Image (cartoon, grey):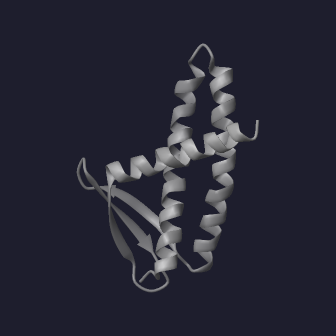
Amino acid sequence: MLKPEQRQLFHKFLILEMAVQSLQRDFPVIESLKMSKFYLSILDKILKDINQDYYNSKRLLAKDKIRLVKVEKIDEYFSDVHIATAGNDVVLRYANMALKTQVEKLLISHQNKDQALI
């Protein structure tokens, strides 16, 4: 069973995990572009920022013996997220579009944060 604060932390971790995976999948595509050096520097900076948050969240979850087992796509609209805990394992259902939107918001917020520093 997940406590509310653990569930909130896990949700943050899940969004970070998906953002990292998405950026890593995009790297080969970006490398093939003519202006790849420009785009890769932006992607690399955002990935480094997100990785720090990702590993911190993962570490905090590991302290409570909580880990992501797998994300199972149910259909085009929903996915089940399987979580191993110290007690009972948990399955949470997420809307795919909501996850995608939250990942996009996270990436945009990190991009805007970087632009504000310039």
**Image quarter (top left, top right, bottom left or bottom right) of the C terminus:** top right
Relative image position of residue 66 (x, y in whole percent): 52, 75
Residues 67 and 36: in front is 36
Q: Residue furthest top?
A: 34
In the image, taking residue 100 as reference, residue 59 lies left or right, namely right
Residues 107 and 17: in front is 107
Task: Give the residue at x 50% y 42%.
Answer: 22
Total marks shown come to: 0
Image-quadrant location for residue 82: bottom left
Q: Is residue 37 above or below residue 113?
A: above
Task: Give the residue at x 45% y 86%.
Answer: 87
Relative image position of residue 57 (x, y in whole percent): 61, 65
Q: Is residue 85 above or below residue 35?
A: below
Q: Residue furthest front?
A: 116
Relative image position of residue 15 (x, y in whole percent): 49, 55
**Image quarter (top left, top right, bottom left or bottom right) of the N terminus:** bottom left
Q: Is residue 9 above or below residue 98?
A: below
Relative image position of residue 14 (x, y in whole percent): 48, 59
Residues 26 and 100: in front is 100
Task: Give the residue at x 63% y 20%.
Answer: 36
Task: Give the residue at x 40% y 52%.
Answer: 99
Q: Residue furthest bottom?
A: 87
Image-quadrant location for residue 114: top right
